[in-house]
Image: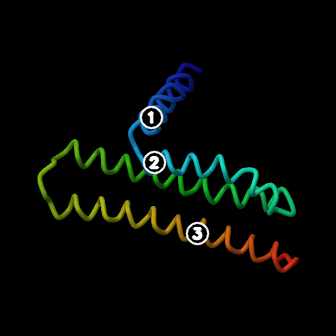
Amino acid sequence: MQRLVNAFRNSLRAFGRLIRSEKAFQQEIFLLGAAVPVAWFLADSWRGFALLIGSLLLLIIVEVLNTGIEAACDAFSREFNTDIQLAKDCGSLAVLISIVIAGGVWLLAVAEKIAGTSI
């Protein structure tokens, strides 16, 4: 049980640090908060709602992992290194892919709502 408590504390510490210092994380948390009522309106079912919110949570997860990669790389060396650049660029690409996924899910939901159909 103590391991769970420690893991929860570590997670809260990371959340607090990210919410205070990482602009992208701040924006994504704000987006999530604004998206919940919109998703409620757009979704025709709990599954649809979960998909809309889940796509944004996926984006946040990838952003957190990208920030962790960047922090680990910076702790290793702040000097230019092609391997570190690749690691950071791959993290950035992962964020971009998750943005495309979330955007696609949301665009499909809006299109379905406008057309009055569902897939």
Tell me the CA gap for discs 1 and 3. Answer: 25 Å
Q: Nearer the viewer, residue 61 or 117?
A: 117
Q: Residue at x 75, y 70 (%)?
A: 109
**Quadrant in the picture for the C terminus:** bottom right
Is 10 on the left-hand or right-hand side of 117? left
Give the residue at mark 3.
101
Examine the rendered structure and indicate whether residue 114 appears above or below residue 61: below
Is 80 on the left-hand or right-hand side of 106? left
Q: Position of residue 85 (x, y in %)?
A: 23, 62
Q: Secondary structure at mark 1?
A: helix
Whether the residues at callouts 1 and 2 have beta carbons within 8 Å, the answer is yes
Q: In the image, which disc is placed on residue 14?
A: 1
Q: Secondary structure at mark 3?
A: helix
**Quadrant in the picture for the N terminus:** top right
Label 2 neighbour load within 10 Å: few <14, some 14-19, many 20+:
many
Label 1 neighbour load within 10 Å: few <14, some 14-19, many 20+:
some
